[in-house]
Structures are given as C-alpha cells and as structure tokens.
Image (spheres, helix red, strand yellow):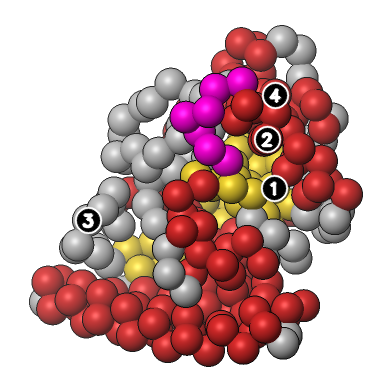
Amino acid sequence: MIVIRSLVFLICAFILTFLMGVVAIPVRLVFKRSALAYARLWCRLLLRMLHVICGIDYRVVGYELLPKEGPFLIASQHQSAFDTLLWMTLLPAPAYVMKEELTKIPLVGPMLLLTGMMPVERSAGAKALRSLLKVTDQAVAAGRQIIIFPEGTRVPWGQKEPLKPGVAAMARHSGLPLFPVATDSGRFWGRAAFLKYPGTISVVVCPAVSGRDRAALLGDIEGAWSKGQERIASGI
C-alpha cells in the first residue's frame, strides 16, 4: 500500500507542478506581484496531497517564538523535500537560500527568482559569500523571513553533516535573530526517497541564538538542534 500511495503522490505532484508551471508563465508576465502567493499555493497543495495520499501530517512546536512580522533567520535541519515546502506555508514573506542551479529548471526556475528566493553559487568561494551577504541585505530590506539549511544538503535522519559557515556570516552581518529548527522529516520522506511513510513529522523551533564568533554560533545551532531532537525523541 505504501508503494501505491507513494506512486500516486509522485504522479499527482508531477501533474500539479507541470500545470502550475505552465500557468505561471502569465503570472510571470502580467501578475508579477502575485508570484509569491502563487508559489505558496503550490506548496500548500503539495502538503495537502502528501497528507491525503500518503498519510503524512506535521506538527510545529515553538512557532510562537518567531516574530509575528519583519525579517529574521531560520537555520533548519534539512532531511527532506518537505523542509523546503513547510515554511512557504507558515511565514508571511519567506525567502530561501538555495543553490543557483535550481534557477535553471524550466518553468520553475524563473518563478524562484520572481518570488525573491536567494540563489547562491556555492562553488564560487569568497565571491559566493559576498553574493550571499548581498542577497541577505536585499531580503532584509524587503522584510523577508530568511530560511537557510546550514548543512548545505539533505542529510538522512539521525546523521550529521558539518555546518557551512554562511549562516554565521549572515547572522553577524545582518544582526537578525536566528532561530534553529530541528525536525525528523527524514523518517517519513527521506532524501531522494520514493517511498513516503505515514506518520506525523515533528518540527521544533528553538529559542534564538546570537552572534559571538563563527565557531561559537555554529556550535550553538548544533546544540539547539540536539535539544530539539531530544524533545522529538521524548514525544515532545
């Protein structure tokens, strides 16, 4: 049954993405101000399909810690494609830090740019860091909530990956509050996994951490994630 449900979800997600990608063409040309709302609708529909077809729900603990408006940083664990959908539905003006290659995807890529996402060429070294800080300034000026995955890639649930220093540079440069987020999304929808297992994904927003030096800030993020995982393991 899980195989059938996962296949049905894959087919439905492809059809939805293709159709909304085609409809996005006039949105890009005529209704540019609606681009973010349109992208958020796509995310909500995918999460709804994930629940109805695959039996995957989610709960967010600590959401009340986040400011009600204005810019701030979220440093989230990244285990699943789910993580890239969730904050589009929860925040008023989300902006994801993402690899630049995603902007080259047909239909989808132009919408990512129009919605104010933050592409960075990660292989560009110091130039990439300057680019990251530039788009950070732009997002702050626009009042966006910035989501970054400091591990730099999807990491299987229960495993660890060294954090990239970009998140510390963003926090120190912008002075924004930074909220670590722990999750167990990979238990139900793994990295590049076809099978989707029914259950409830837990997302834990941890208290904000702040600036000192880079190593200390990265350590604070990892420490907050560990505490979040302990809460998830204990059933919150």
Which marked residue is nearer to the observer: mark 4 or mark 3? 4
Disc 1, SS: strand
Q: In the rendered view, does 143 fall on the left or right side of 121?
A: right
230 versus 8 height, above or below: above
Query: Where does residue 161 sit, x and y in percent of width and height?
Result: 38, 26
Q: In percent of the image, x 48 and y 69: which residue is there? A: 108
For the N terminus, the image quarter is bottom left
Query: What amino acid type is highlighted by mark number 3?
Result: Ala
Residue placed most toward the observer, 118 or 30 = 30
How crowded is the residue under tag 3: few (<14 C-alpha within 10 Å), some, or many (20+)? Answer: few
Residue 30 position in % (x across, y down): 72, 87
Residue 53: in sight, yes or no?
A: no
Along the line of sight, the residue nearer the viewer: 117 or 53? 117
**Who's the residue at 40% across and 39% down the image?**
153
Point out residue 206 in the picture as x, y percentages from the top left corner.
Answer: 64, 38
> In the rendered structure, which segment of residues is drawn in magenta?
120-126
Query: What residue is shown with label 3?
Result: 193
SS state under label 4: helix
Measure how far apart labels 4 and 3 are at the Cα level.
Answer: 32 Å
Which residue is tagged 4? 169
Earlier along the polypeptide chain: callout 2 or callout 1?
2
| Residues at marks 3 and 1, CA–CA distance in whole angstroms | 26 Å
Q: CA distance from mark 2 to mark 4?
A: 12 Å
Q: Earlier in the sequence, mark 2 or mark 4?
A: 2
Q: Is residue 129 above or below residue 98?
A: above
- Could you give the CA–CA distance between mark 2 and mark 1, rounded to whole angstroms? 15 Å
Query: What is the x, y in percent for residue 228?
Result: 52, 36
Q: Which residue is mark 2?
A: 131
